[in-house]
Image: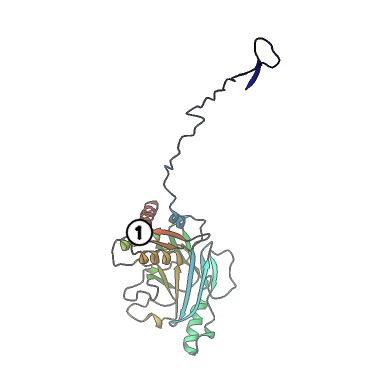
Amino acid sequence: MVLAPFPDGGPSSLAVVPEQTPQFLLSPTVDIPPPCPNSEPPENPLRRLLVPEEEWEFEVTAFYRGRQVFQQTVFCPRGLRLVASEAGDGTLPGQPIILPDPGVWLTDRGVLGYVRRVLSCLGGGLALCRAGQRLWARRLGHCHTYWALGEELLPDSSHGPSGEVPKDEEGDVFDLRPFVSDLIAFLEGSRHSPRYALWFCMGEPWPQDQPWTKKLVMVKVVPTCLRALLDMARSEGASSLENTVDLHISNSYPLSLTSEQYKAYLQDLVEDMDF
């Protein structure tokens, strides 16, 4: 406020003059920000499975005449390659996974000799790499190899192999799209559980209608992200309950999802994939 003298000019005559209050103009379009609703849907965390830069984790298990002799879980930026020794061409695709010396595990000299012969024919090895939603295999040596999708505990020996791994060219062995479609059907009540374990029979015909444990060299490769997706589907008891899944890819983190969220993300993922 401002102090001003009375008109008579007396020294003690002071009056209070009200000061004019300044007015602040508020623009409804500039000064007050309008509400910003989040119109974009949340990012689907399962889409990371399709990102080329994301590394899938693989669990590799080897069997000599039905006996487990090796198991290793690895992240493979350029895929993996099953070999019999460390020496090899560094320009070949995939991270080398060295199968163990059968002499450490086998006592039957006849079987030992046959297994060593199979391993010696691997040459550059058996390559398994990922390209987007697909996995492909390629034979880089002389050892004929047959493959099939099966259960984790055993391959499907009641049917023939899904195919033979081609030599020196890429052949598809897995497609994520039918797996996710089967997973959605499984969530909706189908009794058919999608398969994701890749079995390879090396150096011999596929064990059709005979025990697979009689084969000299069998190798199982499991993309652990697919195991996690199926485990998540199996654990869904009610849509109101959250379950946690770890995708087992590089830089992954646990996801807590309800059954409905999980199913919606899977359906969205199918729409993003090629036929």
Residue 136 percent coordinates (x, y): 44, 63
Residue 101 percent coordinates (x, y): 54, 81
Relative to 149, say whether 212 is above or below. Answer: below
* Residue at the bottom extreme of this rendering: 108
Query: Is residue 171 visible to the viewer in this orientation of the structure?
Result: no
In the rendered structure, the answer to whether residue 141 lies left or right of residue 240 reads right
Amino acid type indicated by mark 1: Ser
Q: Residue at x 38, y 80 (%)?
A: 212
In the rendered structure, the answer to whether residue 140 lies left or right of residue 12 reads left
Q: Residue at x 54, y 85 (%)?
A: 104
Residue at image mark 1: 240
Which image quarter is the N terminus in?
A: top right
Splitting the image into 4 quarters, where does residue 196 fall? bottom left
Count all numbered tags in the image, as a single digit.
Answer: 1
* Residue at the top extreme of this rendering: 8
Residue 71 percent coordinates (x, y): 50, 75
Query: Is residue 74 visible to the viewer in this orientation of the structure?
Result: yes
